[in-house]
Image (cartoon, rainbow, N blue to C red):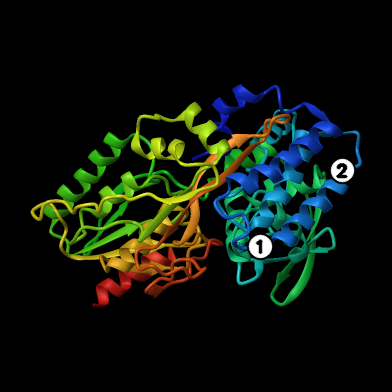
C-alpha cells in the first residue's frame, strides 16, 4: 500500500482544502474548545470512566489558559484539542492527526524525520530507515534525538493520542507513524542528531531530513492492511480476512470461497489472521466466525447506548432513521442510557462449517471489532488465540460516531456505546492470547505465524 496515507485521503482533502491554510482567531479557538468540553460531557457514553472529572477539567482549563496568541492555524488548534480529548483515556474518543495540514505541508516540499520506530518493552527501535545512513540498521535502539531522551519525546507525543493505556498509546504511535507525529509536535527540521545504542556503545549519527512524499510516504507501508487472501500450507490453511468493512456482498463471497476451498483441501488446521486489522462492523466478523462456530453466538454479553442531542442530530443527517437501531436513538431522552438487544448469530449449516482446529492471530494492532471478535471467539471456545495482547480492550466504550467543531471544522470522534465481552468480564485489559508469541515489528520476520506453524507441525 504505497503512499497509502496520502492517496487514500485524497478524496477527503478535496472537501477540506479551504481549511488547511486557514487561521482562526483566539475567540473562535476558545469557543470551539468550550464546545468540545461541553459536547464531550454530553455525547461520550462515560467521559470520566478512566479519568477523574477534576483531573480532566483541570487539564482542559490549563490548555484554555495557554492560548495567548491572537490566532492559531489548523495544525495548532488540532494539537491543542487532541490534548483535551485524550485526557479521557478512551481509545474511541479521539481527534485524528490533522491530515489536511499534513497534506498541505507535503505539497509544499515538507520534510520529515527519516526513521520509522517500533516501541517495544519501553524502548524505541529502528523499524525502517529512510535516511542515507547505512549505520542506522533495523533493530538498533534509538536512545535520543537532538540530545532529548527518546522517552521524553514519546511522553510529549502521548497527549496527542487517545488510548486507555500507555501500551495502547505506543501502538497508536506506531499506527500513525513516528515521523508524522514528530513533525506535528516539533515542526520542520533540516537535520537530526540521533543517538543509537550499538554493541553496548552510544553513537551519535547526523542525518538529514527526508522529503515527505518521495523519501517517506512513497517508500513505506501502513501498519493496517486491508488485504484479503487465502493460502494453503502443508499442515494448515491460512486466511487473512482484512478489515471488517467495505462491500458486504464482496466480503461474504470471499469468505464463502475460502471455506469451500478449505473443506475441499481437507486441512485439519485453520489460521485466521486478525493482526494489523482496523476492525469495523460485526456484520462482517460474525459471518466469518459462523463458518467455524459450533453454536449460536453474540459479540457481547451486554451492549448499551447513550442518547444525546448531538447524536440525534448526526443520526438524522447521516443514517436511515427508519432502521430500528437508529430509531431507538431518536426515541430515547437525551442523557439516557439503554440496552440494545441483538439476536444471537447462527452458525453456517453443518455441511459448510470447518470442524478442525482453529487459531486466531492477534497483536497490539488488532483494533476495535478485531479485538472484540477475538475475545468472543475465546469466550465461546471456538478457537485458540495466538500472538500478543491487543492494545484495544474487548470490553470497551465504542460504537463511535463523529461531529465537527463549529468554527474550525475539526472532526471529533466519540463513543456512544459500552459493550461488555461475552464472558461478562469488565477487566480493563486487552485480549490475552492463549499462546503468547511476541510480534517484533522491527524486522520482516513473522514470528507469530512462523511460531504457530512450527507448533502445529510438531503436534
> In this picture, is 68 found above or below 133?
above
Name the residue located 29 percent from the left edge and 50 percent from the top edge: 286
> In this picture, is 66 found above or below 441?
above
Is any atom of residue 220 visible in this view?
A: no
Q: Earlier in the sequence, mark 1 or mark 2?
A: 1
| Quadrant in which the C terminus is drawn | bottom left
Residue bearing the label numbered 2: 67
- Spatial distance from mark 1 to mark 2, Cα to Cα? 23 Å
Name the residue located 36 percent from the left edge and 58 percent from the top edge: 300
Q: Residue furthest front?
A: 333
Front-most of residues 234 and 167? 167
In the rendered image, residue 95, in percent from the top left (x then y), is placed at 64, 44
Element assignment for label 2: loop
Tell me the number on the disc at residue 129: none
Check if mark 1's residue and mark 2's residue have beta carbons within 8 Å: no
- Res 153 quadrant in image: bottom right
Element assignment for label 1: loop
Residue bearing the label numbered 1: 51
> For this view, does 403 lie left or right of residue 278?
right
Amino acid at each position: 500500500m504505497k503512499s497509502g496515507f496520502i492517496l487514500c485521503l485524497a478524496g477527503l482533502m478535496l472537501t477540506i482544502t479551504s481549511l488547511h491554510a486557514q487561521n482562526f482567531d483566539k475567540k473562535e479557538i476558545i469557543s470551539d474548545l468550550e464546545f468540545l468540553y461541553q459536547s464531550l460531557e454530553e455525547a461520550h457514553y462515560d467521559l470520566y470512566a478512566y479519568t477523574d472529572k477534576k483531573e480532566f477539567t483541570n487539564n482542559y482549563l490549563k490548555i484554555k489558559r495557554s492560548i495567548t496568541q491572537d490566532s492559531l492555524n489548523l495544525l495548532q488548534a488540532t494539537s491543542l484539542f487532541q490534548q483535551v480529548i485524550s485526557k479521557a483515556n478512551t481509545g474511541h474518543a479521539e481527534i485524528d492527526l490533522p491530515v489536511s495540514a499534513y497534506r498541505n505541508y507535503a505539497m509544499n516540499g515538507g520534510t520529515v524525520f527519516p526513521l520509522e520506530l517500533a516501541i517495544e518493552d519501553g524502548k524505541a527501535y529502528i523499524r525502517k530507515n529512510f535516511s542515507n545512513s547505512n549505520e542506522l540498521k533495523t533493530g538498533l535502539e534509538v536512545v535520543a534525538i537532538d540530545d532529548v531522551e527518546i522517552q521524553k519525546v514519546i511522553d510529549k507525543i502521548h497527549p496527542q493520542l487517545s488510548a486507555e493505556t500507555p501500551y495502547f498509546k505506543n501502538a497508536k504511535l506506531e499506527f500513525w507513524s513516528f515521523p508524522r507525529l514528530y513533525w506535528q509536535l516539533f515542526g520542520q527540521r533540516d537535520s537530526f542528531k540521533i543517538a543509537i545504542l550499538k554493541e553496548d556503545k552510544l553513537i551519535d549519527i547526523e542525518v538529514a531530513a527526508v522529503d515527505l512524499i518521495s523519501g517517506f510516504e512513497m517508500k513505506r507501508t501502513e501498519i493496517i492492511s486491508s488485504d484479503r487472501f487465502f493460502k494453503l500450507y502443508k499442515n494448515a490453511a491460512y486466511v487473512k480476512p482484512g478489515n471488517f468493512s467495505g462491500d458486504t456482498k464482496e466480503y461474504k463471497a470471499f469468505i464463502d470461497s475460502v471455506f469451500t476451498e478449505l473443506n475441499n483441501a481437507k486441512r485439519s488446521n485453520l489460521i485466521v489472521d486478525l493482526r494489523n486489522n482496523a476492525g469495523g462492523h460485526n456484520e462482517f466478523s460474525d459471518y466469518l466466525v459462523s463458518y467455524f462456530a459450533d453454536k449460536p453466538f453474540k459479540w457481547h454479553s451486554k451492549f448499551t447506548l447513550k442518547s444525546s442531542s448531538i447524536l440525534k442530530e448526526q443520526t438524522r443527517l447521516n443514517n436511515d432513521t427508519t432502521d430500528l437501531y437508529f430509531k431507538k436513538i431518536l426515541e430515547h431522552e437525551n442523557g439516557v442510557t439503554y440496552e440494545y438487544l441483538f439476536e444471537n448469530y447462527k452458525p453456517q449449516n453443518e455441511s459448510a462449517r470447518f470442524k478442525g482446529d482453529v487459531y486466531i492471530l492477534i497483536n497490539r494492532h488488532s483494533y476495535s471489532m478485531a479485538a472484540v471478535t477475538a475475545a468472543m471467539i475465546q469466550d465461546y471456545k471456538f478457537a485458540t488465540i495466538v500472538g500478543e495482547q491487543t492494545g484495544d480492550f474487548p470490553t470497551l466504550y465504542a460504537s463511535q460516531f463523529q461531529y465537527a467543531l463549529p468554527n474550525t471544522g475539526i472532526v471529533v470522534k466519540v463513543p456512544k456505546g459500552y459493550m461488555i465481552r461475552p464472558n461478562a468480564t469488565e477487566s480493563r485489559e486487552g485480549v490475552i492470547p492463549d499462546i503468547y508469541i511476541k510480534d517484533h515489528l522491527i524486522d520482516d520476520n513473522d514470528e507469530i505465524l512462523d511460531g504457530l506453524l512450527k507448533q502445529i507441525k510438531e503436534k
